[in-house]
Structure formats: C-alpha cells, structure tokens
Amino acid sequence: MKLEQAKTLLVELLDCGYGDLQALEIIERDFSDIIDYYNNNYGENEKITFNRLLDANFQLTLSEVNDFIQDKIKELEDDEKYEEAEELEALDAYKDFETYSNFIDSHIWLKNNQEIYEKYEKELEPIFGGYSPF
C-alpha cells in the first residue's frame, strides 16, 4: 500500500482531514495500547474517530499518572517519608488535569496542584511523551 493510500484510509476510518493526521505524529505511545484502552473503556462496538482516539490517549495518560502517584506514595511510605506521601494523596489526575479534543486543537493542561506535580515533572515526562502539560 502506498503512503497516500494509507493516509486516505486513515482519513476515512478516523473521520478526519489530512491535516489532522499531523497531530498523530506527536503521540509516542504505541497505538495498540490506545486502542486497547479505548475498547476497554469506550466499548469495542463504538467507532474510533480521530477525536475519540486523541481523547482515549489523554485518558490513558491520566490513568498512568494516577498509577504513578499511587506507586510514588508506596515508595515514600516505605522510605518513611510520610509528609511527602500525604501531599501526594491529595492528587487525582482526572481532577487536576483538563483535556480538550477537537481535531488539530487537542491538548492537555494542568489546572490544579501544579506545585506538587512540578516536583515530579522529570519522572512524569515519559508518561506524557511528546507533550508537556506543565
């Protein structure tokens, strides 16, 4: 299959424009992980559109941030750093971040608890991949 045919296929399958496909280039996550997350959380019978794909990527990212927080809390408690662990217990990525999916204008940003998240920015960078909400 030629590249132009593949682009046409993606445009048709994702219900988007050719220019929108550029937004997919910054996603560093394996698309099979995004599709698995989508199928498990949105329903396998729901058509995957471009906006839904971007939203699923954001929601998967937030899920991974929450996993990071829980793992970090356990690590800090094991190291008897209870005050730092308690600070993290107030975080919830689904409440602290905002997402917007509208074709090429899709983005994620931090709206709450910025000071706390910034302490762990370097550790969180791999989760956010090609974009940073900080």
Image (cartoon, rainbow, N blue to C red):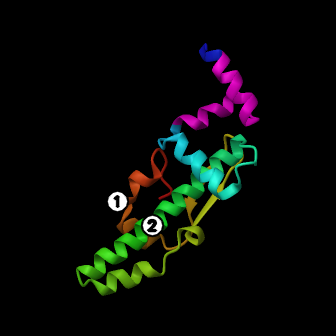
5 and 121: which one is in front? 5
Q: Which residue is mark 2?
A: 67
* Residue 83 - label: none
Amino acid carrying mark 1 in the image: Glu
Picture coordinates of residue 115 (x, y %)? 43, 72
18 relative position to 130: left or right: right
27 relative position to 13: left or right: left
Q: For the residue carrying disc 1, how many other residues have a C-alpha within 10 Å: few (<14), some (14-19), or many (20+)?
A: few
Picture coordinates of residue 89 (x, y %)? 44, 81
Residue for point 72% across, 36% down? 14
> Magenta part of the protein: which range?
5-25
Residue for point 73% across, 32% down? 13
* Mark 2 residue element: helix
Pair 1/2: label in front: 2
Residue for point 47% across, 69% down? 114
Residue for point 47% across, 59% down? 134
